[in-house]
Structures are given as structure tokens and as C-alpha cells.
Amino acid sequence: MQDTPAGAHAHAPPQGFLRTHVFSLDHKVIGKQYLDLALVAVLTGMVLSWLMRLHLGFPATPIPGLGKIAPTGAPAGVITPEYYLSLMTMHGTIMVFFVLTTAPFAGFGNYVLPIQVGAEDMAFPRFNMMSFWVTFVGFVVLICAFFVHDGPPISGWTAYAPLSAVGGDAGPGLALGQTLWAVAIAIFCVGQLLGSLNFIATTLDLRTKGMSLMRMPLSTWAWFITSVIGLIAFSVLLPACILLILDRVAGTSFFIPSGLVVSDRLQPHAGGSPLLWQHLFWFFGHPEVYIAIVPSFGIVSHVLPAFARKPLLGPKVAIACMVAVAALSYMVWGHHMFLSGMNPVSATLFSVPTLIITIPATIVTLLWIGTVYGSKLRFTTAALFCLGFVSVFVSGGISGFFLAQPSLDIYLHGTYFVVGHFHFVMAVAAMFGIFAGVYFWFPKMYGRMMNETIGKVHFFLTFIGVYCIFMPMHYLGFAGNVRRYSAFTDDYMKSSLPLHQFITIAALFTGAVQLLFLWNLFRSRFKGEPASDNPWEATSLEWSTSSPPPFDNFGGRHMVVHNGPNEYGTPGARDYIMQTDPAKA
Amino acid sequence: MGKLFAVILLVITIISAAIFISHTWWLPTDISVLGVGIDHQLGETMLGTGILFIGAQIVLALFVWGSRDTPGRKIRIFPGGPAPMVIGAFVIVGIEIVILSLVGTKVWARIVMAPPDPAAIHIDVQAEQFAFYFRYPGPDGKFGKPHPDLIDDGSGNFFGLDPANDTAARDDIVSGTLEVPVNRPILLTLHAKDVGHSFYVPQLRIQQDFLPGIVIPVQFTATTVAKPEIVCTQLCGLGHFNMRAYLDVLPDSAYDAWLKSQSQ
Amino acid sequence: MTAPKVALAPTAARTGVWVGIAAITMMFAAYTSAMLVRQGDAPDWTSIHLPGILYFNTLVLILSSGAYVAGQRRLLAGWQAGGTVAPEGIRWLHLTLGLGLLFVAGQGVAWTQLAAQGVFLASNPASSFFYVLTGLHALHLLGGVCGMLYVFSRLRKSARGAVAPPAGAVDAMGLYWHFMGVLWIYLLGLMALRL
């Protein structure tokens, strides 16, 4: 902690490359570091998904060059079944933890939240820096699993015990690779706990004069709510990982029952409960979905009014919905376990809150749609991604109705229907929120505009692409096509191969479209049009300072807030009132 | 730009819905007694959510279509503010939830919570990396006690039976195919040898995990002579995609003949 | 050094500690429920006999909290009287630190006693939970020791007049330290009743 925790910027900015760019205490640098980490992670995860899709669509076709990179996993470029599972496990883990948690929450939250509440920095800058570097170490440990002797783990991102707990007997990748996985996730939890702690303290204590809770922008509300969810969720995943590590390396039996015979060897464990892992994991795992998506709720609620040129419909209702979603997210974890062998009565009990959680989700969706009604939409790329977000969130949310019912889960659990559902509602929707955030805040972060033409092409092709990838997965699920299979060559699922090939082509295409985004990102950073302080004519505090903001965010000024963040479409020469403007008459 | 977005969104919505409605890819024909409840429930859910899906996307497209920022245009607030949204969500989604959970819970209870049928044929199922084994009690009607320490796949003792000391185990029949007679209730007891697995037969509308350490009962009655596949849906290791067996639904006479041939 | 938000600093530190307490509570709640679930469906549960030194350690930890309260009071009184850092306040805090380390050493004795009886981490579920709960509590307490060292460095700076009196840090640190005591008493009760 700094001498005065809040006053990290009260003295001159630090000098030297290490202190300004690497081990910086500045929340803006840390936010960018998180976003850069997420970019590296998302590219890694995307390449993994390409390899998986190529293998699923065209199992016998060698992938050029892959044989050289992974000679054991893909001899002569043809992916082995176990390497497919490794790719899948690493794809899920990297995407959920190091992209969907780091980018919308830790990345944007770090950069924007302190500015939006009018603070000079986070409450505990040193913890903030530790949070990033701990997370970074977690990522490095996870990636190390690619390079250990028998490869990365093959137990999926959920790492169900006892497969994940008994060690190398259960298969390749389940020795050192799985241990590295568990250690990486435990480290990640520590990093995110430090981050959540900072977000909560900053929001509660460092708001500037006049910034009452109800005047906070919806994005800040969303990050605040997310940090509360994260604080509870990661506090449970961390113990679960510690117990898993002990089962693996210290011979304890928390998750391993008696009498297991794996690879013809009677396991030296007794009495553990595999269901306990599932309960602990999903107690974290379901709220994790909201850790990924609630920041995007906030981003869309913040960005959409700025381009609709009218206030968000019912901001207080939106906040109440986010709080309701966060609270309910802790009562629904059992819906991942309807068929796990737990008590069938509890399945019914978990089903009801799962269905109820769709009500607040529906309300916010209707609020966004109602905000679009009668608006003066400025079709910027950020606005388009907000609209696209609403569409994919509806598509993904609606399939949740099927999976929330235990009786339908009997048929659909473990099929591609589930894969389509969670990719839409959590992955694609969250990615659209991230894209909206990037196009919206890029000018503030780098002082330059992104190219709008490339941006719009990027949006439309991505929008069409994601529907081509994930909508067919619902059809596959209805046809009984099982997920986590590395091949569908020799059984009743063979008939779905053409659909898999279509998805593969759509995935390669959509992935290639992201190169446009990458190019736009890098080109605009150095060659983009210079951005004004408030290019979008938005109201919140980040637009009351320069682009990019000075080291202490407001150049020594102490911002005083007189208005809410939602004053668009006001009469007068300017159709908006900034939060720092004199109070509305 | 708004019109382009609206048109693309409508096209996506129509194609997505049309493929669902035309049943281009759909569930395989149900061959079980209880599957009809699931199919009915699925149809109801499809109808309700389909209307919500198409409705929401069309309304979004329409609102976007007509809201370009042109000079002189005045913004309009949604009539009634957020209240109609809140009420609408509570009413529409609420009714949907009540109906689905009332009916769905009955379906679920009938499948999963039904008391064991005393007339059911009891078959013991063991899942292991990467195969299913099915055990019938044999003429004495009693299963031998399994001993994990005696399991030896090499000599075919998949269940760890001890025929030398356990008379009940001597006539147990072990098969790699699940042979069942048509139209007779079947009781499976699922247990895993090593890690988690799952038992999935889409045609039977049955899916149930194997949880190491506990035994889980599953009941079904097949109504048609057929030979669908049983596949594993719980990630169990490198051979997961290859873990499968056949369910062989036989006419009564053929089943009896099979039992007899196995008991020799 | 001008610190414009000095008035807010104590609040933020206190909020931070409260949030940290919430997280740690949640973690130990997870271990507790894991233990109850594990015990519920385990035929292999064998109780272990808690080493008697744990009760002595408990006393040490309670005394360390008392010493902290005494130290904090003297420091505050000194500051309110317009003085700098009260030396007897520092001595009390040193006593807290010493007692805290004595507690950890005592826990170490408990572990060696159990190990001498052949009861190790993987011996049985009860011993696994014993080592996990006591070990992680000790780890969190050592985190508190690090916080205490930080408070000492702030007090030294303040004595030199380099920074304002770190009343907020002292206050927040105390909150964490007392929480460690409360957590330990809960864990001891849990283990005495359920292990």
C-alpha cells in the first residue's frame, strides 16, 4: 500500500521504463496490461479452437505445420484424440479465465472505473499491480502445461474429479499437466481476489464530490457488482483448487472415493466425494458466467445511450436487475449437475431459481430494446456491437429455457446444444461487449480514433459469422450429437458431419475477420485520427479529461459531479449534459 | 446502416427459425415409454421460446430500422417508461416459467423419482475407460458381490467377481451389449470403475452420469425392437469419443434364447 | 508530501480489510462445507485427538489481540495529545507481533506432535482437514505479520515526521488481527466438535 492509499498520484509520476510500463501502480497502465494479456490469451484460445474445428470437420486431413509444432499431439499434422481433448481443455480454460474474466472486468474495469468515479487511482495501487502480475504468472503456469512431457490436461475446463484427481494413471496430460492447471487456476483466483477487493474499496470510498451511488455510470455499477460476485466465487474456487492439488500431490482423498481401479491399478485413496468437487466448482462456475457477462451489461447500458442520444430506459431498474442476477447466480449452480447423481429433488429446487433468473435478464434486454425505440441512433461500430450484443444475448439466453429444465436436460445435457447455448450467452455476448468497449474507449485510452469503416466491416462479418458457427450447434444438439468427442466418424453422429464442416468453415472465416480488428487496433494506436477529449459527446467523467488522461486522471483538478450519467436528449444547443456541468435547472 | 443491420438480423432470425421449424435436424424417433413426456415438454418449450426469440429479434430490428440520427429528429421515450418492460417480463416470462416448471417437474419426477418396479429386469452396469459392461444375475437371480481388488480386465473379470468363494457370482452373465426384451421394465444400476462416465441413448431419451463411489438406478421400458448406440457423454479420458456399446432391444423369445445361450 | 485524500484513506483501508475478511470467511466456509460433506458420506472417517497445545495457542492469540488494543489506545492517545508516536504503544504492538509468532510456533509444535504419532496430512480425512485448516489459518496469520511489519515502517516514518500519523492503517490492521483470532476460535470449535 502507498503511504496514503488513495494518494498514489499525489506526487510526480514515476520515472523509468520499469516503473511506468511494467511494474506500474497506475490503474490505467494496469488496465491496459490486463487488456493486452487478454488479447494474447484470446488469440491463443482462438488458434486452439481453429485446430479443434479443423479436426472435427476434416478429421483425416493433416494440418500443415502442426506436426512440427506438436510431434506427439499431432503426428504428421493429424490431431490425436488425446491432443484434441488437450486443445479443448486449454481453449476453455484460457477463454473463461484469461479472456472473459480479464478483459471486460479486470481490464476495462481497471482503466475506466477509477476515472468514472472521479478518483486519482484505485484504493490500493500496490495490490492492483500484484493482481495483474499474479494473474500473469497464472497464465504462464497454464501455458507451461503445453510444454511438459505428456502434454496439457485432458479433463476439460471443469476438471471433474476423479479424472482430474487420480493423476497420470487416468491418461496422458493428467500427470504434471493437470497439476499445473490446478496451480494456475489457484494463482488466478488470488489475482482476481486482490482485484475485486480493490474495485469494491474504490467504488465505496474514493468517489469524488457529488458522485452519489445513483450518479455512478451503469458500467461502474456493473464492475462493482461483478467484483462482489467475483469476491465470493473465487473465494470458493481457491479452496477447491487447493484441495484438488493436495489430492494430486499429497495423497489426500478429498475427491477420490474408495475402490477405484484406474489403468488396472487399485487407487490408494478412500472415501472422497467426486460430487463435492462438482458442487464447489459450480458454486464458482455459474457465478463465473455472470462475472463474464455483467460487465458487458454495464458497457452496453453505458455505451448505447451515448449513441442513441437518449437516456437509458429505467437505469434504476437496470441496476436492480443486475443486483438480482448477481444474487440469484449463487442459487443455481446445481443446474449443471441435474444428471450428476445428486438427489433428484434438489434438481427441481435448482431449476426454479434458474428459470427465475431469466426475468431480470429479460427486463434488462427489454430496457435496451426500449432505449433503441425512438432514438437518434448514430451507427458507430461501438453502437453496432451493442445492438449485436442484444441480439446474441437474446439468442443465447433463450436456449437457457431448455437447459434449465431437468426433464429436457436429460436429452440435451452433454450435447452440442449446451455448447451453442453457452457460447452465445457467455462467450459471444461478452465478446461483443468487449468489442463495444474497445471501440468506445479506445480514443480515451490512446488519444486516437479507430477506423470506423474497418470497424463496421468487422462488425457485420463477425455478427453473421457467430450465428453461422453457433446456431447450427443447437441443431446438432437436437440430433443427439455429443460434445467433447474428437471424432464423429463411425456412428449415428456421422450424419452430422456436413454440419460440422459448415461450422468449421464459418469458424475459420470468422476468426480471419478478427485479423481486421487486430490490424485496426494496431494501426489506429499509431496512425489513427487524433481524438478530442469527448469524441462521442458522452456525459461521464472519463470524457471530462484529456485523451489519454494525465497520470493523475484529471490533472490535479478535483471533479465535482452535479448530474447523473444519463442526461442525453436534453433541450438546448447541446443535446447532453455532462456529469460535471452545472446542475440542471 | 440501421437498415442493413435490421435486414441482416431478420434474415438470420428467419433462417435460424426455419431450420428449427422444418425439423431438418431433429431428435431421433423415441422408442421408450417415458420419452413422450420429454418430447412433449420440448415441443412446448420450443413454441414458447420460439415466439420470444422471433419476437425479440423482430422488434429490435424494427426499432433499429427507424431510428437513424437525422437533423431535426426528436427522440421519443418508450410509452410508459420502464414499467411496461418490467410488467411484460414478469407476466410473459413468469407464465412461461410457471407452466414449464409445473409440467416439467411432473415429467422429471416420472422419469427419475419413480419407485423401482418390482417386475423390472435388473441389470448391473459398469462403466470404465472406455467401455460399458452389463451384468445379468443369471438363473439364481442374485448378483455376486464385486471386489475392486479382484478386477482384472486381462482375464475378463471386469466386475471383480469371486466365483471361487461366492456362489451367487458363479452364474452371473457379463455382456458387452445391453440385451433387453421389448416392452418390459428394465432397472439398471450404474457404477463406475475408475472415473466419471455417462450413459446416453438418444432414442430412449435417457442420459445419466456414472459417479464413482455410488450406485445410481435408472429405469426404462423400450417399446420398439431396435439396436441403437449407447454413448458416453461425460469426459472420461483420451478414448472418450470411442466409448460406446449397443442397446439391443429384442423380442421376448429372442431375449430368452439369448439368456439361455449365455447361461450354458 | 501532500496527500489530498488523506481523510478518505482510513476508510478505504478499513473497507479493504472488511472486504478481505468477507473473502477469507467465504474460503473457510467452503472448507467447512467441504468437511461436512466429506464427513457425511465417508465410511472411512476416523477421529483424531487434537493436541492440547492448541488451547495454549488460543490463549496466546487472544492475549496478542489484547496487546494490540492496548497499543492502539496508547498510540491514539499520544496523537490526540498532539505528540508523535507513543513509544509504549509501539512496545505493545511489538508484543502483539511476538505473541503472533509464538502462536505460529505453537501450531508448529502441534503439527510435529501429530506427525510423531504417525498422523500426517494424508493419513485420514480428519487429519487432512486438520492440517489444511490450521495450515491455511497460519498462512493468513503470517499475512497479518507482514501487514504488521508494514504498519511498523509507517509508524517509523511518521515518527520522523515524514508522513501523517497512520491512524487508519493501525485501525485496519487491528481489525484484521482480531479477525484472525475470531477465525481461529471458530476453527478450533469446529475441529473440537467435528474432527
Image (cartoon, coloured by chain):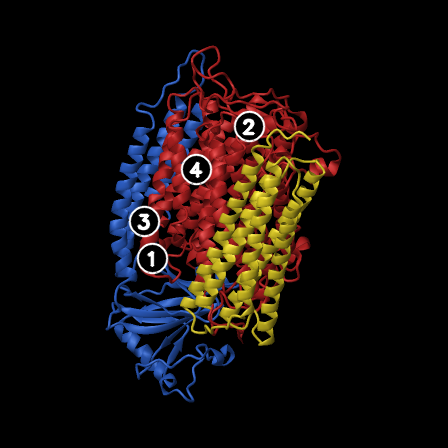
Residue A169 relative to residue A346: left or right: right
The blue-coloured chain is labelled B
The reply to whether dot 4 and dot 1 touch (C-beta < 8 Å) is no
The subunit letter for the residue under badge 2 reads A
The red-coloured chain is labelled A
Residue A282 relative to residue C110: left or right: left
Q: Earlier in the sequence, mark 4 or mark 3?
A: 3
Checking the image for residue A118, the label placed there is: 2
What residue type is disc 3 on? Val
Comparing A527 with C107, the one in front is: C107
- SS at mark 1 in the image: helix
Q: CA distance from mark 3 to mark 1?
A: 10 Å
Can residue A466 be seen by looking at this rendering?
A: no
Q: Looking at the picture, does residue A556 appear above or below residue B48? A: above
The yellow-coloured chain is labelled C
Q: CA distance from mark 4 to mark 1?
A: 31 Å
The subunit letter for the residue under badge 1 reads A
